[in-house]
Image (cartoon, coloured by chain):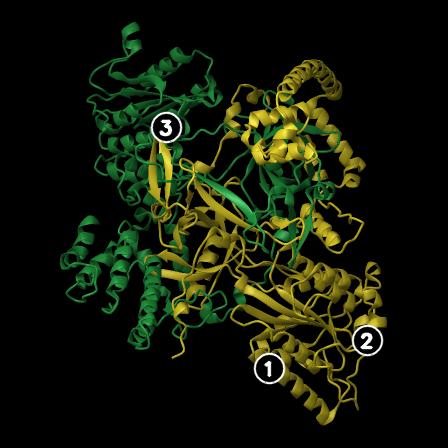
Chain colours: A green, B yellow
Amino acid sequence: MARNKESLTLLLDIGPSMHNALPDVEKICSILVQKKLIYGWNDDVGVVLFGTEETDNDLAKQVGGYDHIVVLNGISTVNRNLLGTLKKLPRGTVAGDFLDAIVVGMDLLIKKFGTTNKGKMRLCLITMLKEDQVGIISEQMKSHGIKLDCIITRMSSGMADQKILVENDSLLSLLGALRTRNISPVTVFRGDLELSSKMKIKIWVYKKTSEERFPTLKKYSDKAPASDRFATHEVKVDFEYKSLEDPSRNVPPEQRIRGYRYGPQIIPVSSDQWEAVKFKPEKSVKLLGFTDASNIMRHYFLKEVYAFIPEPGNKKAGVAVSSIARAMRETNKVALLRCVWRQGQGSVTVGVLTPNISSMDTMPDSFYFNVLPFAEDVREFQFPSFSSFPSSWQPTEQQQDAADNLVKMLDLVPYGRGEILMPDMTPNPVLERFFRFLELKSTKPDSEVPPLDTSLRAVTEPDPDLSENKSVLADFRGCFELKHNPKLRPTRRGEGGENRGYFPIEDFEAMIARRDGSEWVVRGIRSMKIYISDLLENSYEGTPTPRPSTEPEEFNQFLREIFQRWKATDLRGFFEMVASKNISLISKTEAADSDATDSEARSFPAKIYFSSQ
Amino acid sequence: MDIDPEDLFRDDSDSDSELFQEREANKELVVYLIDASPRMFVPFSQHEDEKGETHFHIAVNCVLQSLKTQIISRSYDEVAICFFNTKEKKNLQDLTGVYVFNVVDRESLDRATAGLIKEFSIMEESFLNKIGSCYSIFPGSKENTIYNSLWVAQALLRKGSLKTASKRILMFTNEDDPFGSISGVLHRDMIKTTTQRAKDAQDLGISIELLPLSRPDGKFDVSKFYVGLLGLESKEISHFVSSAGERLEDMKDQLKKRMFNKRKVKTLAFLISDGISIEVNSYALIRPTVPGAVTWLDSVSNLPLKPERSFICDDTGALLQEPAKRFFTYKGEKVLFSVDELSEIKRLAPNCLRLLGFKPLDYLKDYHNLRPSTFIFPSDEEIFGSTRIFIALHRSMLRLRRFAVAFCGSSARPQLVALIAQEEISNSSGQVEPPGMHMIYLPYSDDIRYPEEHYLNDDAIASRPTDDQIRKASALLKRIDLKNFSVCQFSNPALQRHYSILQAIALDEDEMPEVKDETLPDEEGMARPGIVRALEDFKAAVYGENHDQEEAASIASKEASAGLASKKRKAIADAATQESANYNWVDLADNGKLKDLTVVELKYYLTAHNLPLAGKKEALISRILSHLGK
């Protein structure tokens, strides 16, 4: 699909000031190319290095100047070799000029495409400079139809702590900022936004957010002989509908009829009959009215978000959308709409339109549209007022102060540092981890899942820099007291069934001690496994557990499992403690029916300890 | 020793489906006890428009609404409807003044059916003739219909285990002093035995709730009798009384809210900082309700069919067990993964909420949304002190106008979430917004798209409105103002229609019911002169005076070019007709060979016969088959 093809030129500063950051740059560029190999295999990628000792580019040859810039890879379709190149970037010797680099990059793009590929060209500059400079350039480039994504590793006063800064905020947002997968936008609706039957505005509706799912993997069949080089290894999934009376009978489509649930009944309805009576609203987007923004609370937003954009090229639509959007912002009002995106769609959507005032002159104002729930979608459960709780549950003044201080300290928009974890800049760690693992596996098929990259941990764990003021935390911890409910018995079934046992060890020992059948021991171990896994999931300071020696296989397997599952996380402390308490696999010496040799048992904790370093 | 080894350390499983549906184990068994004494039939007439409404009617209506809700939410709850203070009696215990309402083919306590809803909705007209109202608690009579009704309800609720279901009795009455006419020892005795009856039921795990119907001239005084029956504490009494409504609408609202028991999705650990982990419960207050999925039936017997999945190796045709390996094509090669490895990739953090920090509220943008929010409320059940910390943070967040950002480590989709503190909001009909926090699932950069950036051009500058245009727009906004709009005031027309059709089919009715689409714009309101004028002003301001003529002209020119397009379409159709003639469609259909053709080939037929081309291959085939009359 050529229309979706994108041309990207990476402008990489490899000068001395960047040397510390280059390992990360290599990582990011590899991921970028890797994703292109998967999603945009048709896209073009060029690489320009600046800050190099030598000079090698067209402009230098033709007009002179443009020194210390090397075109490492002319613009060509993305390929695997590029991945290798980017993984080992050279280290430059000169402080490069990013302006020259941009010119060289643009020259590459323009020579290759002329002006035909407008809008699909992107320059990605990775360097260290002040953000405002880049802002100006980026604005200008947009008018030329070239997008400039800038990645700025932060400029800090002292070079000493630079490395830390790069890791802490830029790298993550850098990954997020690189829009690696370019989905060409598809409209959900094109047509009129009907303010009334006489006043309509031409709009196009797109998805603004759409959950990027985990890649779909195909099922693998190993049945084909190894010699078959053309084997697809694919698996076909067949659905058959079997009769209840005669389970061997397959009922073909023409003998099937749709049934819909109505309470305990299933009502058969033929598709013709259904088609004749079902709800068939007309395709349209109609205004219901306006209301105060405060009338629509944020938590009622129901689904993925849409963007309403004035019909491209239609100035009247642009002005109409823009006037309403700006009036909405001035008066703090929002619009309510009823939408049927497609003819033949069997449902309507009611939602709220809010303004999206453009921050750039060249970008039109538009709206966001959020779906709101219907009456059937809301459950009005009643909850007690906080004020009705006993005074022992109410915070004291001192506790309230401690909470205020904690909220102030853990500020994710710290002064002078920019917003941390901005959704637009935060990559999905699961997807990142998958792609890294994919690359790893493609070279070493028996690799294990690598631990979550340090840069991605910033998504799952608090930023240690924010809680530098230890006294606020200590204060908070000191003035609140948390205690487990001692009355809770493990066997009690709560309403939701979430009560975990608090006497697991006693119960476990009781089960182990039973003499009326070995199944109790197995069950006990199984339950303990669940309990320990739970414990690990919910705490960072596990406690060592007593170990039975009657069912060694069950225990050993479990210990291996825990290890496999948790070694990559920061539960290392737990394993170190396990090791320090000399808890290991049950060896053959201890129990004859064990499946672990003495040496395996001896090395087990050590293996954990070293591999986690 | 009495322990169940399977249950010893319960594993709290987590999956995406949990977000959207509650476990069946959480079902509820409810007996609606509706007072049918003559007092319930006295018209309630404070306002003109509420004339003729009786408490009995309100109660019946509430129950009817909740039955319909149960159908739509596809709940497994079971209900029984039971009147007391009736002339006729119908109950297994043969007790006076109690009438258990039911229809054929249904147990007394069972899931709601089409028949039940139908019969119940028309029952009121003939109630006084067929079932009758009679108050038999008076001096000299030994009857105690309240006692009887509780007994009947308790017997109905004998069904089902408490482990898998919660049991409730919901009582609708407007009599706060049922034994008021009796005096002396007998009065005390009646109260004592009735209260004991209620206590016995409560000891069996049945909760008894009272939905009092009061009238404007006399408050419902729970302290007269029901305090003892419900076992209320003094604090709760004041709460109870204050919730009795002034207006009929409020009363309906209140009843509606109190009919449903709240059910949590799960209990979560909320890790504030290392070593400080509090307990919160999550609730799915807002989830889209969709029509139930299709169940395939045998068209002859109408019995459900059992879908069976089989895996076939594409290379050898061998039947497989569900394969344990998956592959992803990367750099032209198949990279293999085990299912365990894939779930390991998704395991990023412990299964809890982990606080990362706070941001000012305006950093949460309107497009930072993916899924319905989840409500969280603190609990001190397992960890004492949780509520106190939660309240303190809640208050700080409201005061400092910040939301919290946390990482929610579920195994299905580990995600960043925003937690917004919500202050309690109440009005005359009770609580509107409960106090707590709403968890909003944030998108990652991978989930956000920038369609607006695709149309960067200089025109945008030209499209900026003038102050006058904005002023006209503001005037319009003020004109078409829905002042009383409340989110979710509309019923879903598709859903309502879906179930009313099914109900009609289930009851063999010929007429398909009309369902009002409440979501259509208010045409009448829009035609009001003030609004029409504001719209015209705005239109002239942004489009110019001659817009309609210009549009007409441009449409005319488009139609001219559309003539060309239609010629082109015709040429395609002709080509398809020719291609289509190369196949013997009837033969292919009869021999089940259609599936061997490609989608392109199938489309020849469809294009040639002017049929829709959309859908999967299976849909195309069935379209061809039905067109051939097969």
- Chain under callout 2: B
- Contact, mark 2 vs mark 3 (Cβ under 8 Å): no
Q: Quadrant of residue B168?
A: bottom right
Residue A367 visible in image: no
Element assignment for label 1: helix
Residue A583 position, x and y percent, is 20, 63
Q: Residue at x 81, y 61 (%)?
A: B50
Give me the C-alpha separation between circle 2 and circle 3. Answer: 78 Å
Image: B1 above or below A84: below
Mark 2 highlights which residue?
Answer: B133
User: In the shown orientation, is residue B291 left or right of residue A527?
Assistant: right
> Could you tell me which residue is drawn at 65 percent across and 51 percent down?
A260
CB atoms of marks 2 and 1 within 8 Å: no
What residue lies at 34% left-to-right and 71% top-to-bottom? Answer: A520
Q: Nearer the viewer, residue B116 or A483?
A: B116
Mark 2 element type: loop
> Residue A578 is drawn in which quadrant?
bottom left
- How many numbered callouts? 3
**Classed neighbour count for the residue bearing mark 1: other residues with Cα under 10 Å, few (<14), some (14–19), many (≥20):** some
Q: Residue A37 bears which disc, if any?
A: 3
Q: Amino acid at mark 1?
A: Lys
Q: Could you tell which of marks 2 and 1 lies nearer the N-terminus?
A: 2
- The chain carrying label 1 is B
**Mark 2 surroundings within 10 Å by alpha-carbon count, few (fewer than 14), some (14 through 19), many (20 or more):** many
Location of mark 1 (residue): B199
Q: Mark 3 belongs to which subunit?
A: A
Q: Is residue A93 above or below residue B308?
A: above
> What amino acid type should be assigned to the residue bearing mark 2?
Ser
Left of B147 or right of it: where is A608? left
Q: Residue at x 73, y 63 (%)?
A: B116
Measured as percent of width and height from the top left, residue A95 is found at 23, 22
